[in-house]
Amino acid sequence: MSSRIRRFRITGRVQGVSFRFHTSQQAERLGIVGYAANLEDGSVEVLARGSEQALELLHAWLRHGPRLARVDDLIELEVDEAAGIAGGFEIRGFEIR
């Protein structure tokens, strides 16, 4: 089974509600590696590498996020290569875009 890489950008009430922490738990359960990072504009970016099925399950989870979150929009992009993905799933601080 080949792996794919997806970049997600989630907007709404997604900072200060443990969104990155819960995303990392979900990703690890699904065997996904990558990271979740807060962006300066208040959104969260998730870069994820895994099987097509695992990425679709993560996408479905990201539409709602954890209990205290409110997801207003979710943008998904497939990318060919991703720098900065090591083993495991990281929670990162603010990324400047």
Image: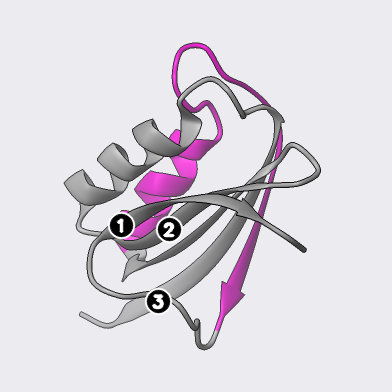
Q: Which residue is mark 3?
A: 4
Quarter holding the C terminus is bottom right
Dot 3 falls on a residue whose secondary structure is strand
Crowding at dot 2, Cα within 10 Å, few <14 / some 14-19 / many 20+, comes out as many
Q: Is residue 81 left or right of residue 4?
A: right
Kind of residue at disc 3: Arg
Looking at the rendered structure, the kind of residue marked 1 is Phe
Say which residue appears at 53% left-offset and 26% top-offset: 64
Front one among 15 and 58: 15
- The tag earlier along the polypeptide, 2 or 1, is 2
Location of the N terminus (image quadrant): bottom left
As drawn, the residue found furthest toward the top would be 68
Q: Position of residue 8 (x, y in %)?
A: 59, 55
Work out how far the residue at label 2 is from the one at label 3, CA to CA, in angstroms.
14 Å
Is label 2 in contact with label 1 (beta carbons under 8 Å)?
yes
Q: Which residue is mark 1?
A: 89
Q: Residues within 10 Å of mark 3 (few under 14, many from 20)?
A: some
- Can you say whether 30 is above or below 62 in the image? below
Residue placed at 45% from the left, 74% from the top? 5
Q: Is residue 68 magenta?
A: yes
The three-letter amino acid code for the residue at tag 2 is Tyr
